[in-house]
Image (cartoon, grey):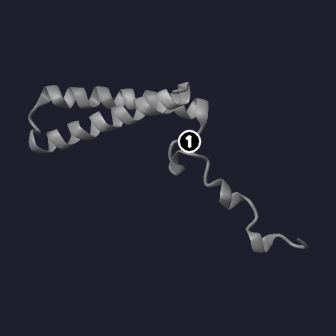
Amino acid sequence: MNKREKLLKSVSQVQFALWELHLYLNTHPADMEAAALHSQYEQKLKKLCDEYEDKYGPLTPAAGEGAEWLKNPWPWDIEGE
């Protein structure tokens, strides 16, 4: 497993933990320890996503500058081929 794959795996693991905490907090909203842990995982996920995007590019279409395929000419816009 290369560095990119390891970083992406870390992002996935933290996303999973964050989602599980979110679901837990839906049924246990008064659990302040879980709420604090949720906040810690949110910060960790942001850090990991920023690191990944700095090194390898956007993780989601919304994270990028826009869809590259929209900036290129469409097949019917190319003349003479």
The picture places residue 29, in percent across and down from the top left corner, at 11, 39
Horizontal arrangement in the rendering, residue 33 relative to residue 15 (left or right): left
Q: Residues within 10 Å of mark 1 (few under 14, many from 20)?
A: some
Q: Quadrant of the C terminus?
A: bottom right
Residue at horizontal 47 percent and vertical 33 percent from the top: 8
Of 42 and 55, which appears nearest the observer?
55
Tag 1's secondary structure?
loop
| Position above or below: 32 against 71 | above
Which of the 4 image quarters holds residue 44?
top left
Residue at horizontal 91 percent and vertical 73 percent from the top: 80
Horizontal arrangement in the rendering, residue 70 relative to residue 24 (left or right): right
| Circle 1 residue | 58
Q: Amino acid at mark 1?
A: Pro
Residue at horizontal 43 percent and vertical 32 percent from the top: 9
Residue at horizontal 30 percent and vertical 26 percent from the top: 40
The picture places residue 43, in percent across and down from the top left corner, at 36, 28
Of 61 and 10, which appears nearest the observer?
10
| Position above or below: 81 against 69 | below
| Position above or below: 54 against 70 | above
Which of the 4 image quarters holds residue 21?
top left
The picture places residue 18, in percent across and down from the top left corner, at 28, 36
Q: How many marks?
A: 1
